[in-house]
Image (cartoon, rainbow, N blue to C red):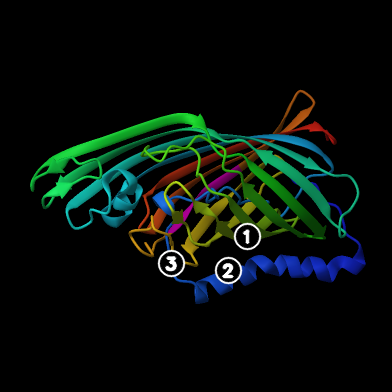
Amino acid sequence: MAYFRPINTSLKKLCLSVAYLALTLTIVAFNYVPAGAAEDGKQFYLLGSRASLAGTLPPPGTYVSSFKYYYSGDASGAAADGVALDQLGNITLQADIDLDVMFMLEVPTLLWVAPGKVLGGSLGLGLLVPVGYQELDVGVDVLATLTLPNGTTFTKGAMFSLDDDTLNFGDPVLQAVLGWNSGNWHWNVNGLLNVPIGAYDKKNLVNMGFNRWAFDASGAATWLNAQTGREASVVAGFTFNGTNDDTNYNTGTEFHVEAALMQHLSKAFAIGIVGLHYEQVTNDSGAGATLGGFKGRTTAIGPNINYNFKFGQTPVSTQLRWYHELDVKNRMKGDTVFFQATIPIGGPRQ
């Protein structure tokens, strides 16, 4: 269960404006933006990583989280072509491509929540250092004479496959979050900065690093009734991407929204439903974006479980959730599992 602290009455209007930010972003995106897809059909912000209690912050102190992410999916057509673009070129008319991908990620996270107040709220600063394993299998059915960028030529009817895997560090991420609460309401604004120093090689089919700067700005709100145990949370934000200089690919600005409806049965246990939606607000650009706007989207839904317990005298908070993608365009389609465990290493141990 989250910890709650009241805010100064004079700042309530400011907090309410933050609470409506997530809703405003959602309305704007669904009524204005076209769809799009990122380079390699993936984005730096992990979709579904925030759900239940997203609007809350813990008390001042230092916290360590173990964040585990697993994804398994497949793609065909333009979505598969986009992922294999560097190795195969833009061969949509010359071949049918199918691919299968598996992605496992561990993200150790350190969060420090400062004592005192900033703009009437709590300030948190964090560092995320991802390390993970990816594997990708690509099957190609040649429809017409095809010459790959490396000079290899295949005739109509030929079939061949490519595969790649990697176990390495990704780009570290810097975080800053500012949160408020009043009664049953809890809000925060959150910023994530992707620092492109993780493992990356243009020649690889899969990379842990993105080789581009990126910044994600989001607003989150949680309503939690401590008497009934009912919770509603929503997070909405935009990701602003820099250019991958090695591929001359500039991923467009992306929009994401995540939501959770939960029933807290006790201080230790809660169960509910989570969902997400992703679209891109501007087209990809640059010399490397040979597929043009490469429009796409994804929507997913699934269950979520929260469980809190004590390991000796140390409180441990955990969340487990699963997303099944329902509506996907120009992206891989599959299933995602998240597991997160958080413990305080300084500050309150209640």
Earlier in the chain: of badge 2 and badge 3, it is 2
- Which image quadrant is residue 255 in? bottom right
What residue do we see at 57% from left, 50% from top?
213
What residue do we see at 42% from left, 45% from top?
335
For badge 2, the amino acid type reads Thr
What residue do we see at 25% from left, 46% from top?
98
- Near mark 3 (Cα within 10 A), the count class, few <14, some 14-19 or many ≥20, is many
What residue do we see at 50% from left, 30% from top?
168
Magenta-span inclusion, residue 317: no
Q: Which residue is mark 1?
A: 234
The secondary element bearing badge 3 is classed as: loop
**Nearer to us in this view, 111 or 152:** 152
* Disc 2 + disc 3, Cβ < 8 Å: no
The secondary element bearing badge 1 is classed as: strand
Q: Which residue is mark 2?
A: 26
Which of the two discs, 3 and 1, sits closer to the camera? 3
**Nearer to us in this view, 205 or 3:** 205
In the depicted structure, whether residue 119 falls above or below residue 341: below
Label 3 – label 1 distance at C-alpha: 21 Å
Q: Which residues are magenta?
A: 298-305
In the depicted structure, whether residue 116 falls above or below residue 203: below
Label 2 – label 1 distance at C-alpha: 10 Å
Is residue 233 at all visible to an observer of this figure?
no
For badge 3, the amino acid type reads Ala
- Which image quadrant is residue 215 in? bottom right
Location of the C terminus (image quadrant): top right
